[in-house]
Image: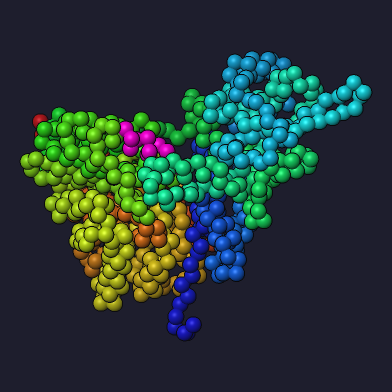
Amino acid sequence: MPKNEIKRPYLDRDVSWMYFNRRVLQEACKEDVPLLERLNFLGIYSNNLDEFFRVRMASQNRVAEWDRRSRESKTAAEVVKQINRINSRYVKDFELAVRQINSLLAENNICIISDTDADAEQLAFIRDYYQRRIDGYVIPIWLSAVKHLDYETDEKIYLAVKASRTAASGKRSCDYAYFSLPVSSCGRFVRLPDKDGRSYIMYIDDVVRCCLPEVFEGNGFDTFSAYTFKFTRDAEMEIDNDQRKGILQKISKGLKSRRKGEPLRFLYDGNMPDDLLRRVLGKLDLGERDSIMKGGRYQNHKDLMHFPSFPERGLNYAPFEAIHRFSLEGADSILDRIAQQDRFLHVPYHSFDSFIRVLHEAATSHNVRSIKITLYRLAKDSKVVRALIAAARNGKKVTVVIELLARFDEESNMEWSQKLEEAGVKVIFGVEGLKVHSKVLHIGMKRGADLACISTGNFHEGNARAYTDCILMTASKRIVREVSEVFEFIERPYSPIHFKELLVSPNDMKRRFISLINTEIRNKRNGKPAYIRMKLNHITDPVMVDKIYEAAFAGVDIDISVRGNCSIVTDGLPENCHLRINGIIDRFLEHSRIFIFAAGGEEKVFIGSADWMLRNLDNRIEVVAPVYDPTIKREMKLIVDSALRDVHQGRLVDGTGNNLPWTCDDPLPGGSQKALYDHYRELERTERQYDSSED
């Protein structure tokens, strides 16, 4: 390496993800976070880890096994080892956090008790509960009767049972069985009657343990011991390439293949006796790189996200009531208001109802000719779909691009697509080989300007209550025309459509972002203002990572807020290199993507659906749009600025995994999410007062 060349390190995306998930775990350990919210963060951490092993670790294992002599396979094998080492460390931190929080719950008169802690009165309640709610859901399977545990899913938790009896001769014998716990039907937690001012909670695992004689009734066993276990399967779907089959048939078959994916992680109660453990492991085809992890008494900690609530005790966050935007309320047409001036929503601070109202009016207005929308994930009882179906029945030309390969939402999206088609909606199943991840809406008018919405997140009512996302609503002809062309591009992906305003992948988004960064480098050399400020979820694309280094080494000031994966390593950079990255974990999941470039003093602001990952920039259809309205530009800049000043919830993302508290020269007290909510609430109050005074 030449002496004047600075090393540009690249952190593996999966290792960086482990560091991100540790930030979730750190949030669960913060004493100033409400107690039941800390339990929720433990559940989120566990759920994240399950999905990570099902998807990313499965992929790494496949690469490692592909050709052990190749460089790619050796690299993947090393990554698997590194992640397993990191995970082993984090397991200890997680179990310590569980013990500490359980102790604090007890101090707050919420007691989680096991089967051995229950008194006679509680046991009577438990046995009655079992008869009323659980009996019939629990049916043992003898381990000796099955060859492999290939029917069982990794969505459930299992009890392995060692059952013993004494023969007439006095000789003891035992047998081994397992069964799934009926969490989906009965929940994971059972609230027992309060007593002496204390509330009592029991895992369904222990409720069933108390009732094992009833579970094995008639089999002559008199002694039982039961231990939880779970496993994680490879979640990759095998998509059939048979051209004679339709896409719905292929996805349906792929979902079945996922359910029987190879197990690659096994977690079990560390107290499980060796003879029982051997019999369970003997039914799983685990390889040398797969994880076998000894844990505590309970598995599937993701269920902590559904721990019983105690609203009267103040152990959760105080609720944020979504703000209804005054500028989008009232009897006047919301479509006319957008035609007059660009509007925006920042959910969940602003109510998603305003976007639903846009669709409702479009569905019923005689002036609307057509509606086109991309859908990636949908709510269970989607108001978005209801509006689109109503629009089709009202004679509108409705086109819906629905992504059938949205991971873990494939089945739901298939069902919605069939309902839409039945209502007369033209449904497009994306592009083969390219996921459609863009979030755009186009409304064609008979008279007046067409309208468009560009979002950073899914058009999903549930997500809009938990994810921070921005929705730009505009009648700008130069943007709206190109949003319409995005749908042409989706239908004819290899047609030569050139986008001037929008950044569209895989068309030319990466090239355009590189050009914007090159402009900052050039302006810095020419003494002009040069900086980049961004907020997004992931940065792992090697080309973009290298470009960020290049700009930073050229003297461009770069400040980034990244929620998840980040392959940039800022630890050890030269002091004159201003490249800092903040990661925020808070009550809402940070999800918006906002990009700000100094552009020599003529600042450029963009929002959209794309993260800087290889998949987003090269293998998906994504849309990023410029923001032209001065008021909305200021709001987008405020969102990024608030994130970069958040010393309350922020952590330094430097590639080490230490996740040290974030520091800055102008800290924002109380956290960015609270500050933004207070800002929007004050803004609405002022607007309403002003309107009242005008009247």
Residue 641 visible? The answer is no
The outermost residue toward the front is: 244
Camera-side residue: 422 or 676?
422
* x and y percentages locating residue 497 in the rendered image: 21, 60
Q: Main secondary structure of the magenta part?
A: helix
* x and y percentages locating residue 32 in the rendered image: 51, 41
Q: In this view, does 612 lie above or below 127?
A: below
Q: Is residue 597 above or below residue 311?
A: below
Q: Magenta stretch: give its range.
A: 408-419
Instruction: Name the residue located 42 percent from the left edge and 45 percent from the top edge.
Output: 250
Q: Is residue 152 left or right of residue 539?
A: right
The outermost residue toward the left is: 447
Q: Split into 4 quadrants, where in the image is the C terminus?
A: top left
* x and y percentages locating residue 429 in the rendered image: 32, 45
Residue 447 visible? The answer is yes
Instruction: Name the residue located 47 percent from the left edge and 84 percent from the top edge.
Output: 3
Q: Is residue 328 left or right of residue 114?
A: left
Q: Which colour scheme is used?
A: rainbow
The outermost residue toward the bottom is: 2
Q: How many labels does the image show?
A: 0
Instruction: Name the residue located 60 percent from the left edge and 63 percent from the top edge.
Output: 78
Q: Is residue 185 above or below residue 145?
A: above
Question: Does the magenta run of residues contain 661?
Answer: no
Instruction: Name the residue located 20 percent from the left edge and 30 percent from the top edge.
Output: 393
Camera-side residue: 191 or 49?
49
Query: Which corner quadrant of the image does residue 332 belong to?
Result: top left
* x and y percentages locating residue 289 in the rendered image: 64, 56
Question: Does the magenta run of residues contain 412?
Answer: yes
